[in-house]
Image: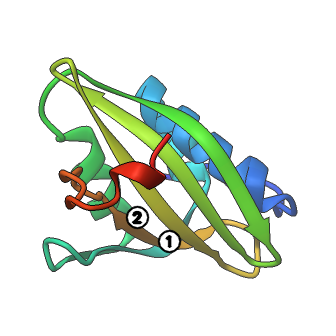
């Protein structure tokens, strides 16, 4: 898939917001436009790594089910950005914490995705919880 070239992006927060909006809208051309050619996607919890924009696009295009994202916050510190989003599929919602790194032209070069599992709080802290 040929990727349209976009001007160098300087506001990484906006780039991450475009990343999430493109995924949620299934706008694969818009999604490709924010990714570096050699983007690397890492999922530490499953041990998966996907390198290359075309493979990462395919990973997202082929993800099964009717899903959506809602971005809750995007924080930036120089060339690093982290986002917190909610992923909903089949009526179930999960949190996603994602760290982004950028290529010199402002496109996303690295994506590190964490999907924390909810768990029951251990006993003995009830007096501290609102």
Residue at position x 26%, y 40% from top? 61
Q: Residue 31 in the image: x percent, y percent?
A: 51, 45
- Say if 90 sits above or below 42 in the image: above
Residue pointed to by mark 2: 53
- Whether label 1 touches label 2, CB < 8 Å: yes
Q: Which mark is residue 37?
A: 1
Q: Cα distance, mark 1 to mark 2?
A: 5 Å
State the residue in front, 90 or 116.
Answer: 116
Extreme right residue here? 10
Find numbered disc 2 in the image and state the secondary structure of the residue it sits on.
helix
Nearer-N-terminus badge (1/2): 1
Residue at position x 75%, y 54% from top? 13
- Say if 34 sits above or below 100 in the image: above
Q: Is 54 placed left or right of 117 in the picture?
A: right
Q: Residue 51 in the image: x percent, y percent?
A: 32, 77
- Say if 29 sits above or below 98 in the image: above
Res 49 seen here? yes
Residue at position x 18%, y 51% from top? 120
Q: Residue 48 in the image: x percent, y percent?
A: 17, 75
Please identify the quarter of the rendering in which residue 43 is found. bottom left
Q: Residue 130 in the image: x percent, y percent?
A: 50, 39
Query: How many marks are shown on the rendered structure?
Result: 2
Color encoding of the figure: rainbow
Please identify the quarter of the rendering in which residue 10 is found. bottom right
Find numbered disc 1 in the image and state the secondary structure of the residue it sits on.
strand
State the residue in front, 53 or 94.
Answer: 94
Callout 2 crowding tier (Cα within 10 Å): few <14, some 14–19, many ≥20: many
């Amino acid at each position: 898939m040929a990727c349209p070239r976009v001007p160098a992006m300087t506001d990484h927060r906006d780039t991450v917001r475009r990343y999430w909006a493109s995924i949620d809208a299934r706008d694969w051309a818009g999604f490709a436009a924010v990714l570096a050619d050699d983007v690397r996607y890492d999922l530490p919890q499953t041990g998966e790594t996907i390198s290359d924009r075309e493979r990462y696009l395919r990973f997202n295009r082929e993800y099964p089910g009717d899903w959506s994202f809602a971005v809750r916050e995007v924080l930036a510190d120089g060339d690093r950005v982290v986002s917190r989003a909610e992923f909903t599929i089949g009526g179930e919602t999960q949190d996603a914490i994602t760290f982004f790194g950028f290529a010199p032209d402002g496109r996303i070069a690295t994506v590190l995705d964490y999907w924390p599992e909810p768990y029951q709080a251990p006993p003995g802290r009830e007096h501290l919880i609102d």
